[in-house]
Each structure stands twice: as structure tokens, then as C-alpha cells.
Image: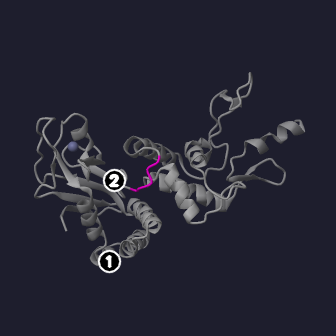
Amino acid sequence: MSDNKKHKKISAAPSWLGLSEDRQAFLLLPDRAKIVKRIFDLAIGGMGSYAIAKYLDAQQVPTFTQSSQWDNTTIDYMLRNRATYGEHQPKSFAAGHKKGIPSGPPMPDYYPAVIDKKMFEAAQVARRQNLAHRGRKGTDLASIFGDLCFCAYCGSNVVFHRISNVQVLVCERALDDGGCSRSAWTYKDFETSVLAFLAHPALAERLSGSQRLSLLDLAEEIRKLSTDQIERYAARVNMAILLKQIVAKLVVHSAGATSHPRLSLAQIRKDMAGRCIDVELRDGPLYRCISVA
Ligand SMILES: [Zn+2]
């Protein structure tokens, strides 16, 4: 084997990996790996790449290059890079293709993985939702619930939406074809209700281990929610991440016990009496029909 062949890995190593001394193996750079994982957490928590860059700068997280600031294209590239979970796509650079064109099947477990494939896929879903709902430059973490909310009547995702400038959560199917309950829940009211339930001291007493710690962290974040924009933003991102660790699912009964399917052109009713939420925690307990605080 020629030296040339041995050294081929150098140029191909992603920025969060180093090389062993004999240059035969990739090494995980733990500090950088942690930052990559954090970026995926943030994306899955609902932050767009502009917002993530802004957030990392505000937290003074060092970049992987000479640059003093994070750039949204770097974040975007990282979030789409399958090397994060270890996959390598061999490329051919023939005929003036600067970026290379895929050549041969992808090779799994080629790099040390920083995240798993499930997390990678979750980030792709979050990116698509982010682009569809808020546009590329959205820096406001509109909902801290990500994809945790489901419709009690049809099982579809309950999504963040605006109805005449009011932020609401509404069944995706009700928006798509009107085939579900024409009812919505004002986002602020929903958030307050769920957080009030989760922050209640009696709940933490029933939990143990990391679940309990996440819940106490969440309560702390709620208590110190600042009015400073960047700080508030960072706190809400942390809340979104903690919520994912605590909650498996929120089942939303936006019209109470019975659904209200009506003509798809009928106006969506907000905050109907009897609305409630089933809260399913990650370690099992299910709390039925938590009503408005
Ligand atoms: Zn529905």
C-alpha cells in the first residue's frame, strides 16, 4: 500500500474527528463530539440553523475552524452529514465535480459515531418542519413541545399554527383536509397547563433517577425564565430538551371528551370547554385528562 493511500483519510475526516498517531484510525474529539450532539439536540428541540449559530455564539462555544463565529451553513451541513452517525459515502471527483458525486454504496460504521441514526433522522424531520412552518430565519422557539403532541381523536400530530395571529396547537389533519375536530388550543394556555402539571412538586416525588433530575431541572428553568431575549431563548431550548427526556407523549383533547368534526371550511374553534391532555411520561406513568390550570 502506498503512503498516498494510507493518508487518504486525512482530508476526509469530519471536523469533530482526529486521526490516530499512525494515521490509520479516526479518533473522536470528545469536546467537539459533545458540541455536535448539542447541535442535534437543539435542532430536534425545534431550533433552525440560524438560531443555533446565534445560540452557540451567545454561549461562547468555540467553533471548529479559525472563525470566531458560528455560521448557519456549517450547522446545516453538519445536520445533514451522515458521518455524524458513522456512515461514509465514497465519492468520485472525476470530470470537474468539485463536490464529488456518490460512487458505490455508503459504508456504515466507517467513522466513530457521535450520534445514532435515530437521532439523525429525528433532526431531519425537525429541519423539514422548521423550514415549512417558520422559514429559514426563524429565531423564535415558538413551541417547546416539538413533536410530542398527538391528537386524541385521530392520532395525527398536533402542530404549532397561527390562526389570525394567535399561536395555537391544532391537529395536522384538521388543517390538511378538515377530517378531524375543528378545534384548537391557544399555545400559551397549553404551555402553561403542561408546565404547571410537570413542575408540581408532588410529581417529582413520584419519580426517580435521571427522570427526577430532568424534572427538577425543568422546574428550575421555569422558575428563572428571564425577560432577556437571548437568555429566555436559551432557557426555552433547554426546556424543550428536558421535555423530551421526561415526556413520551402528550395526547391533546382539544375539544374535550368528544371531537367536533365539522365541514372543512368551518372556522376552527379555540379553547373549548373541557379540553384536556393525557401526559405519558417516558418511564411509564400515564396521567389522564390533565385539565387547564
Ligand atoms: Zn385529529
Kindly indicate the quadrant of the structure image that contains residue 226: bottom left
Q: From what the image shows, is residue 253 above or below residue 287?
A: above
* Residue indicated by mark 2: 148
Quadrant where ligand 1 appears: top left
Question: Within 8 Å of ligand 1, the CB of disc 1?
Answer: no
Magenta stretch? 137-141
188 left or right, relative to 116: left
Crowding at mark 1 (Cα within 10 Å: few <14, some 14-19, many 20+): few
- Residue 185 percent coordinates (x, y): 21, 54
Q: From what the image shows, is residue 177 above or below residue 170?
A: above
Kindly indicate the quadrant of the structure image that contains residue 98: top right
| Residue type highlighted by circle 1 | Glu
Quadrant in which the C terminus is drawn: bottom left
Q: Which mark is residue 184?
A: none
* Distance (Cα) linking label 1 and label 2: 23 Å
Quadrant in which the N terminus is drawn: top right
Q: How many marks?
A: 2
- Residue 221 percent coordinates (x, y): 40, 72
Q: Residue furthest right?
A: 2
Residue found 62% across the figure and 41% down from its top: 87
